[in-house]
Amino acid sequence: MAIFSGRRVPREVILWAVRGYCRYGINYRDLEEMMTERGVRFDRTTIYRWVQKYAPELDKQTRWYRQVPDWQASSWRVDETYIRVGGKWCYLYRAITTGGHTLGFYLSLKRNVAAAKRFLVKTLSQIL
């Protein structure tokens, strides 16, 4: 992959760290400890920088492979929930297929038409 050119670290190590954080939600300290156990020593701030730099690009490149098949996405439901995030109450909008796959989500402080439209436009642009 061209995005890893010029790095002194093998791309497999970077991919493993970014995937561990993004896919499994492992925090940076635990990732640092797991990599040290495998003989690769990096600080958690380095892993943080990798996630900030490579996660959006990897998301763009793998989005096509993670698409929900058409037979599952022919029907989907929209859900709105009031949840507490970081001490603040927010509205969580979700679009879910009948197969249980999440098509998209949107977190908003306000419950209004603008937030609902923003969520639908974002979700439809991702799946179409």
Image: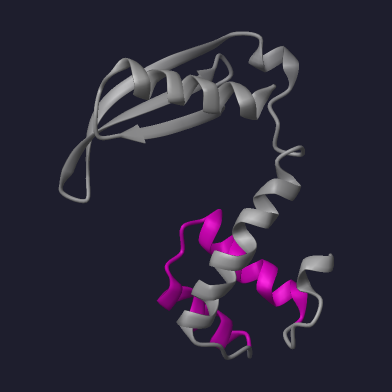
Residue 49 position, x and y percent, is 54, 74
Residue found at x 49% / y 73%: 48
> Which span is picked out in magenta?
10-38
31 is within the stretch colored magenta: yes
Main secondary structure found in the magenta portion: helix
- 44 left or right of 51? left
Provide residue 116's location: percent of width, then percent of height: 38, 19
Q: In the displayed structure, would residue 53 be above or below residue 44?
A: above
Measured as percent of width and height from the top left, residue 115 is found at 36, 24
Q: Residue visible at 70% across and 21% down?
A: 128
In the rendered image, the quadrant that contains the N terminus is bottom right
> Which residue appears at 57% of the width and 81% of the height?
35
**Most extreme residue toward the front, as rendered?**
114
Question: Closest to the observer: 49 or 96?
Answer: 49
Occupied quadrant, residue 93 = top left
Which percent across, then down, holds residue 24? Answer: 51, 56
**What residue is at 43 percent from the left and 18 percent from the top?**
117
Image quadrant where residue 54 sits:
bottom right
Looking at the image, residue 46 sits to the left or right of residue 127; the answer is: left
**Total numbered badges shown on the rendered structure:** 0
Q: Nearer the viewer, residue 118 or 30?
A: 118
Q: Is residue 43 above or below residue 25?
A: below
119 in relation to 40, above or below: above
Q: Describe the colour scheme in one phrase.
A: one colour
Residue 6 lies in magenta, yes or no?
A: no
Q: In the visual, does 15 lie left or right of 96? A: right
